[in-house]
Image (spheres, helix red, strand yellow):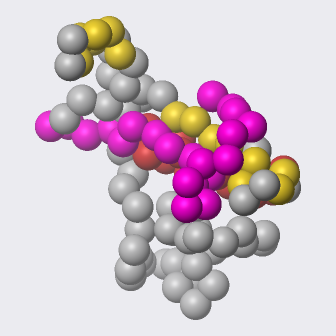
Amino acid sequence: MFTYRDFEKGTLGLAWTGDLKNAGGVCEKNGHYRGSMKSLNTGIITLLNYGKHVPPAVSHVTLAHEIGHNFGSPEVQCCVENVNITTNNFVLYITKKWILF
């Protein structure tokens, strides 16, 4: 889902992360959670951040990042094989700023 809402603390997107042990992710069916029907196979990105329009390249990377979570990928916070850690140019790297490749 796309929105034009300015989330707190610079958040550009949110998604349920797929997990074999917990609900959520792309393969999850609708179900009753906390008393109501919910879909835990969704993600959302915003096109507004700190009052400014998010550039298309940033929104594309954000969408890919959230889809990665839906398929079960966690946030990457440290060392990953075959990744350039000095530039942090991989889609599941956590950042609070826009990085245009």
What percent of the width, then of the height, locates residue 30?
34, 12
24, above or below 89, in the image: above
Where residue 19 sits, quadrant-wise, is: top left
Q: Residue at x 50, y 44 (%)?
A: 14
Q: Is residue 19 left or right of residue 64?
A: left
Marker count (numbered): 0
Q: Main secondary structure of the magenta part?
A: loop
Residue 71 at least partly seen: no
- Magenta highlight on residue 18: yes
Q: 2 or 60: nearer the eye?
A: 2
Q: Is residue 31 left or right of residue 3?
A: left
18, above or below 90, in the image: above
What percent of the width, then of the height, locates residue 23?
24, 29
What percent of the width, then of the height, locates residue 101?
78, 71
Residue 23 at least partly seen: yes
Q: Residue at x 67, y 47 (%)?
A: 6
Where residue 96 sits, quadrant-wise, is: bottom right
Q: What residue occupies the far bottom of the structure in this picture?
A: 86
Q: 5 or 95: nearer the eye?
A: 5
- Magenta highlight on residue 7: yes
What percent of the width, then of the height, locates residue 100?
78, 70
Where residue 84 sits, quadrant-wise, is: bottom right
Q: Is residue 25 left or right of residue 54?
A: left
87, above or below 58, in the image: below
Q: Residue at x 50, y 68 (%)?
A: 94
Q: Which residues are magenta?
A: 1-21
Q: Residue at x 52, y 85 (%)?
A: 85
Q: 51 or 47: nearer the eye?
A: 51
Q: Quadrant of the N terminus?
A: top right
